[in-house]
Image (cartoon, rainbow, N blue to C red):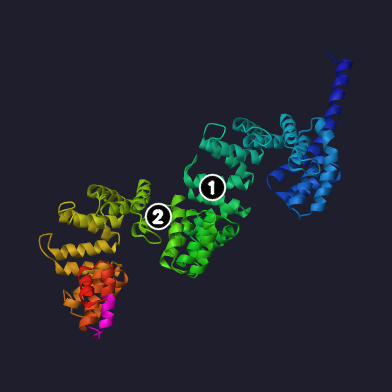
Amino acid sequence: MSPSRIQVKLALFLAMLLVVWNAQSVLAGSLEQGLEAYYAKDYPKAAKLLEPLAESGQAVAQYHMGVMALYGRGMAKNAKAAQGWFSKAAKGLPPLAKNGDGAAAFCLGAMSEEGWEIKKDQKAALNWYTQSAQAGYPQGQYYLGLMNAYGRGMKADPEKAVSWFEKSANQGLAAAQYELGVAYAFGQGVKKDPAQGAKWLEKAAEQGDSRAQFHLGLMYNEGIGVSPNESKAANWFEKAANQGHDRAKFYLGAAYFSGQGKSKDLAKAAKLWEEAAGAGISDAQYSMGTLYFFGTQYPQDYAKAAAWFNKAAAQNHAGAQYNLGVMLETGKGMAPNPAKAKDMYAKAAKAGSPAAMVSLGNMLLTGQGGKPDPKGAVTWFQQAANMGYAPGMTALGTAMMVDGPGRDVSGALKWWKKAADKGNPSAMYNLGNALMDDKLAGKKPKAALEWFEKGAGLGHGDCMYGLGNLYSSGDLGSQDPAQAVAWWRKGAEAGSEGAQDRMGYAYANGYQVKKDQAEALKWYRKAADNGNAESMFSLGVAYEEGQGVPVDKQQAKVWFRKAAERGHRMAKIRMRYEGK
């Protein structure tokens, strides 16, 4: 059957229409490519594609050229040029938008929201974004989603926001894919689904969205919605960092510092942290402080450490506040100031630092930096202990053991046991001592030996000191002086003041070592410098009687006074009868 004249005319008409559509699609395609580059933050490419269109009178391209000129994206900042492009766009957009052009409606929405060349008006922006979104324009859908998400020009509606993000994301807009990924990851406006969140974030990340790259790195780092993978995490952080994402620089620096996901490289870590710290990232400022504090990569410099810690502390970084507290308490890099140290610990403790809670509790217990407050101390110890912080458990147990109405021996032993089971060697030492005391836990030397050995295996000097005492006492069935001195020596070298005092005693009396008064005085001084009252008393005796040093009654009194101030009974008697 041959075609009718009407069919032939219809075929010719459709062919002509196809030619016209193809001609228009060249312009539309160039515009879409330019906008795609713009929203993928490839601004040089966007400018190259959009500028010819803008020069030819394309209003949407003119608007985006204005934005790039205003913010210096892909070109030098030029407010005058930006104003010129906005003026041209404002004249051409309304007719386009009224004819249902989604891109034009979107641009009018953005100009209304920002007040560029037209009156700033949130309601007008909402109206234009809605028209753009309903016309199926992905950028309009994305911005309408943002207005719903954050309640701009309307009451916040997270569920509607997700609906618009999804429409835009399905058209491939990276920014919308990022928002949709975050919504699923955290359950904002949609049922929480980290795996779905990771899927959308990856789509956006592969298009070059630095925010998505960073968050995807976090998800691989923590194993949220994906299997943990340090290498993938570091690679995504690197992609984001290469685009200038400052938090990504911090995390990439951490990967280089730890060797997790990247080969260990302290120089690269320090460089990345310094860049992020300069951009105001508090975690990076804290990390720079630690590099200078411990002399890692940079020469040790307490002044520079304090400067970085202060920057981070000003942003309420608990770790930096705690470290400043330590520096103020110990006088490292600054004059000792117990009151300021206490204030810093208090800030860090309130911000949730369990280490600061313990330090603050210790200051409240002893009255450093103010009046003693034992109840306040116990409250902070309890809070740290409840967080599962082993030093907090240890401190709480010790506070419970103090004589007075609140003394609770069984409670103290319970907390020490919990801390010891978590691997805290100080708690192991306390438990070992308690197990050597009939009145506290019933004398159980073998159980004490077990805890002392565990702590000693962790390098804890006081546990080594405890082992020495145990072998010296004969409580295991017989004395073993050689073992006792061997453990005291190890403990003394590890910094235990008790073990240092015992080594002083061993050399002063020739106990399992050749008698050597000079060596005895060396160990007594180390122990005294660490606050050991017994060694202070022994030094007083040495100066009084001329044991290894010339007789010096005045120096003897100095050491007796120091020992007495720390509660040494015999030193107090000496001071009382011989005069201060």
At 73% across and 34% down in the image, what residue appears?
Answer: 123
Quadrant including the N terminus: top right
**Label 2 vs 1, first from the N-terminus:** 1
The part of the chain drawn in magenta is 547-559
Q: Residue furthest top?
A: 1
Q: Amino acid at mark 2?
A: Ala
Towards the viewer: 26 or 212: 212
At 19% across and 77% down in the image, what residue appears?
Answer: 508
- Against 524, residue 345 (above or below) is above
- Residue 550: say if magenta: yes
Number of the label disc, if any, that sits on residue 355: 2
- Residue 470: say if magenta: no
Q: Amino acid at mark 1?
A: Gly
- Which x, y percent locates residue 263? 49, 58
Q: Secondary structure at mark 1?
A: helix
The reply, left or right, for residue 334 in relation to residue 153 is left
- Which x, y percent locates residue 308? 53, 62
At 49% across and 41% down in the image, what residue appears?
Answer: 226
The reply, left or right, for residue 110 in relation to residue 187 is right
Q: Residues within 10 Å of mark 2 (few under 14, many from 20)?
A: many
Towards the viewer: 425 or 104: 425
Number of the label disc, if any, that sits on residue 217: 1
The reply, left or right, for residue 392 in relation to residue 196 is left
